[in-house]
Image (cartoon, grey):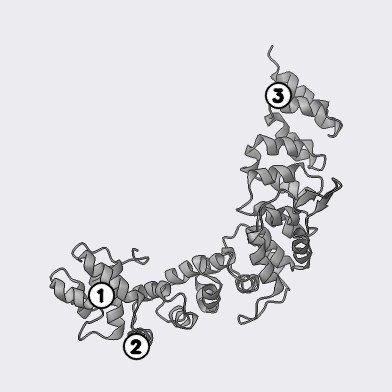
Amino acid sequence: MALALPFDPTTLPGPVQRIVGDKTPPALRMMAAKGAAPGLRPEQIVLTLVVLARADLAHVEPAAKETAEATLAALPTAIRDAALAAHELSPLALDVLADTVSSDVTILERVVTHPALANATALRLAKEGTEAITELVAINEERLLAFPEIIEALYMNKRVRSSTADRVLDLAVRNGKTLNIPTFKEAAEAIQGELILAPDAEPTPDDILFAEAHALADAIDGEVIKEDETGQEVVEEKALPLEQRLREMTVSQKVRTATLGTAAVRAFLVRDKNRLVAAAVIRSPLLQENEAATFAASRGVSEDVLRLIASNGELVKSHTVKFNLVSNPKTPMAYSLRLLPHLRGDELKKLAKSKNVPGQIAKLAKQELEKKAPR
């Protein structure tokens, strides 16, 4: 695995440079790879191991690389603890340690809260980390405000508790930070005035729901439909608790779930009465074309939802989306009129004959059809 942070051999401490340099005897380098480096302090031993194992140095023997990697994976407790206690521990070493000790939350806390931890490492952990890791990253509010990209990563990481995502979002909003989140406008408005849980709060039922929602199978509607013994359509039982618990979520939690949830969750929340929640569904980076087409045809969504779909240049590239919008009598007339000339002949023919669209749309569809007819 390559180093994630920039590496410059000339910036290494002198004792470390002497061991990893190209003039060092291979035998001495192999000793260092085993963790035996006389004269080096613990934080320098760890840095030496990191450089030997991960840096792209052509003169380091493959055997030394493999040995250093194995030593890092089983780093003696005394060396590791002494290194973490040193303020001079390299950010490079901390970045690698964050991965090698990720299963030990107690040790990981010392890594993540170390004053030398690089912002790039914190950002990576915020993007990729587990719930336990991201909870530690979210504690450092000073770092979050200095580098809002970390807040963005935490909010968009599905493993982060919804209560923690709310808290860091609230921190950004209160301090006037504008985040690069697809649904930031809706999320920021929703979070205002809501109670934010403390960093050490236990997971709430909504946090648990958020994790469960990502495990659901995708569905067109927010319900799983099946036929009973009599042939009647019924809602499958496992869908009922999801709907009930989604209804009980706060607006800000619904916004985030709409942003990062499954198709099944989006199909339910797009009908939410709160415009912020419904809008977050359409702005979700996970929204698929087939979902947009289904929403565009639905008379159960609000005009705001249809307006957002019609205003989204990427979504209306789809002829199905365009046709469904124009066919939907709830779509604001201005958008239908704008989209109608871009429909194909077969689509215009359907609209011209349809009894379910406004008369003006049917009339204009007939006129457009006549324009496109060969002369």
* Residue 87 visible to an observer of this rendering: no
Determine whether 347 is above or below 18 in the image.
above
Q: Nearer the viewer, residue 68 or 165?
A: 68
Mark 1 touches mark 2? (CB < 8 Å): no
292 left or right of 138 in image = right
Helix, strand, or loop for circle 3? helix
Q: Nearer the viewer, mark 1 or mark 2?
A: 2
**Residue occupying image coordinates x 77% and y 27%:** 350
- Provide residue 371's location: percent of width, then percent of height: 72, 20
Q: Quadrant of residue 281?
A: bottom right
- Provide residue 32's location: percent of width, then percent of height: 22, 77
Q: Quadrant of residue 195?
A: bottom right
| Mark 3 closeness class: few <14, some 14–19, many ≥20 residues within 10 Å | some
Real-space CA distance between mark 2 and mark 3, rounded to the nearest whole angstrom: 76 Å
Badge 3 is on which residue? 345
Helix, strand, or loop for circle 1? loop
- Provide residue 349's location: percent of width, then percent of height: 76, 24
Determine whether 20 is above or below 324 in the image.
below
Amino acid type indicated by mark 1:
Leu
**Residue occupying image coordinates x 69% and y 36%:** 320
Amino acid type indicated by mark 3:
Gly
Specify which label sits upstream in the sequence, 2 or 3.
2
Badge 1 is on which residue? 12
| Mark 2 closeness class: few <14, some 14–19, many ≥20 residues within 10 Å | few
Badge 2 is on which residue? 78
Amino acid type indicated by mark 2:
Ala
298 left or right of 75 in image = right
Q: Residue furthest front?
A: 229
